[in-house]
Image (cartoon, rainbow, N blue to C red):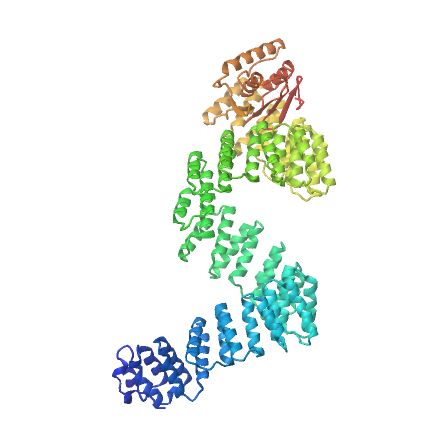
Amino acid sequence: MAIASPIVCSSLSPSTHKLNVISPTSISVLRPNCIIALLKSCSNVREFSSLHAHLITSNLINDSLITSHVLRFLISIDELDYAHQICSYTFEPETIIWNTFIKNQLKEGFPEEVFMTYYHMVTQGVVLDLSTFHFLLHACSRNFALQQGSEVHGRILKSGFGANKSLNNNLMGMYSKYGKVEEVRQLFEKLPHKDVVSWNTMISCFVSVGMYREALHLFDEMMMGGVKPDEITMLSLVSACTKLRDLEMGKKFHVYIEDNNLQIDGSLLNCLADMYVKCGKMEEAHRLLGRCQKSEVDVVMWTTLVSGYVKANKIEEARSLFDQMAERNLISWTIMISGYAQFGRYFESLDLFRQMRFENVSPDEVVLVTALSACIHVEDFALGRAIHGLIMRYGMTFDGFLGNALLDLYAKCEKLDEACIVFEQLPCRSAVSWNSMLDGFCRSGDVDKARSFFNSIPEKDIVSWNTMLNFYVKHVLFTESFGFFQEMQLSNVKPDNITLIGLLSSCARVGALNHGIWLHVYIKKNDIGLDSLLATALIDMYGKCGCAEIAYSFFSELTERNVFVWTAMIAAYAMEGQAHKAIDIYLEMEVMGIKPDYVTFIALLSACSHGGLVDEGYKYFNKMRTLYNINPKIQHYGCIVDLLGRIGRLEEAVKFIETMPMEPDVSIWSSLMRACGSHHNVELAEFAFKHLIEIDPINDGAFVLLSNIYANAGRWDDVSKVRRKLHDTGVRKQPGFSLIEQNGVLHKFTAGEFSNPQSAEICSMLEEIERRLIKQQLPDTSSQHSERLAVAFGLINSQGKSTIRVVNNIRICGDCHSFMKVVSQAYGREIVIRDIYRFHRFKDGYCSCKD
């Protein structure tokens, strides 16, 4: 073939000249690549004619590559007759030329164009051979073209190739990809001689549509038919065992593979590892790794093992394998980062995320969402904002999980302005987006803004209602929370357990027993399932409303009781000072095999404290460490300090504080101060006060308590100094208030305030009580304290011998404590007052706290 000179080639550039102006002599020396370039510049048959002549005279028409491009050109301009004419000039049979064309289309990744070529072949009467049908079936499988596949199947039968084994295997493979089990089965059963490919296709089809047992049965038939399985057979069968979690059968196949010297590598190795991992046999899976050269193990195998250890709650083993990986892909990084987050090890999760970025691995949406979630948990707002910048740098859209994760970050970090910006940028706002934004407004503490945003949510789901309801509960807006619950019912949104837990918590906080009982009845009437959390909330509500026996009655009816339920019952008795009953519940819990947690021991030690059980307190404090391996927290130490203080062992309490492995907090020193006040130890009270205000210089309770201790000791100059100091530091004494529920309405009384509509009647009742106190020669120095106003209100508005229940936000003072004992005896009424430390149940002139 002649070689074209550079001048000739450049002069024939398709971008500068039209083909129809080139003479035949000028193109006689063209190379095939120049011809292909010229062919692309042709737009019609007229422009192609001179090039066509050159192809014939130069015999290039027999070049398969050139002929393929000529066919593509003629088909593109709809000149099929011309294409048929071109093929007649070649030495190759016309069918082979078209098959080559189809083969190239498949190689170039255009299976849809194969069907057009196929239709042209049929139109022109081109004979279709076995290769044609193989190519067509391959195109149907790749393009998921069932309709075309069925048509090709029909033409195979018409062409007389219906009995061809290889075509039948390909047809089975095609139908298998569509999940057409019956079609595959019919083809399979008609095969007179089934080879390993036929069996593999049938088995693979069963596995792909979830017919795992049928796939396993085929293996037995295959063996009986004398066909030896290969690695592909085993791949499908082991996959079936994985789906069935049939470890025993999976092991049998593993033995067969090794006994028959089948090659365990690549996909089969990964499949075996996956089977052992998902069947919970990590040791077996890991053993596969030891049998191979590490260079032969691909990233899929490593990732499978790392994922298995994460799912088996073995994060350290997962990390050890992860660190050995020579190659890590995004999936392996994501599994490890998510694994740490799943176990609450957010710092490790974020450290690994930083390492991933250091190694220039580009993150995807999943790993970024995980990292943002970890930032929320560790309150690393700076890193969260940096991830936001990374998202923008990668040009990712704030959509779906990623947008909501960013919104959640800013909302939970109380960056409301930034949250609003992200919210406005979201292309599509889902229910999650609206609820995250509502959560941000609730965290800001502004009830009006939160409620306004709630009202603007277009479609409120149960999460929206629960978020707003829990805001009211958190801020002790009891009336608002129940009013909101009524709105929820009117809107036809069915409350769930979270709703009811929130409302019960609200009742417990304010001592609204009647509302709590109503909720309990509501739960029964609506057949709402009692999970452990809802059961715990009910016990907690009854306990904090001073009804430990009702709590126990409900507790006894429960068929399933976990550690939270048992702990709530112990706490209910502890609050009422029924220490021995609390201990009995704990002992029963141990007998039932329920392992206590650190909260259980807080409740138990609190019971010992309220009951003055020193030996038992030390016993359970030590048992917590030695038997249950629970390291005491500051709350446990506080219970022991409180216990020692209550019974007057103040020096022992101080020594105990000195042995603590952590620094004492405000609660420890406050507990010691209260004990010093009760046992009139001014010097030690001053010692505790000094340490307390070093931690919290503006603690109003500390100043008030020290002032009262000085007053009881008759040190009035010191009282004045403390009061002056309190005034000079600008610290305001927390106002005392009391809550009482009456006829479904919660009433709040503040010390010295008479704004209640029944104030005149309350004053009259207090005067009557005062006269009784004078008769008993008791001082009346606190006549306007809030609990007295609440109890007077209760006496006026309740009938018969009903119990009066009051909740205080501060500790009841000694004078009011004496006052309540007199009232309980004089009026024959039981008075239950819950202050911030415990319950006081006054009856017949006595208190359950035993003074």
> Which quadrant of the view contains residue 44?
bottom left
Comparing 665 with 722, the one in front is 665
The answer to whether residue 202 is left or right of residue 752 is right
Percent position of residue 795, x then y: 58, 17
**Which quadrant would the N terminus be assigned to in this image?**
bottom left
Q: Is residue 419 visible?
A: yes
Residue lying furthest front in this view?
158
For residue 512, which quarter of the picture? top right
As drawn, 630 above or below 648: below
Name the residue: 55% across, 74% down.
Answer: 170
Q: Quadrant of residue 668?
A: top right
Q: Residue at x 53, y 58 (%)?
A: 334
Residue depicted at 45% across the width and 27% down the height = 730
Q: Position of residue 29 (x, y in %)?
A: 32, 89
In the image, taking residue 559 as reference, residue 704 lies left or right, namely left
Q: Inspect this view and state whether residue 652 appears.
A: no
Residue 647 lies left or right of residue 743; in this view the side is: right
Q: Is residue 325 left or right of residue 372?
A: right
Return the x and y of residue 820 as percentages of the image width and height: 61, 18
Where the C terminus falls, by quadrant? top right
Q: Is residue 777 above or below residue 329?
A: above
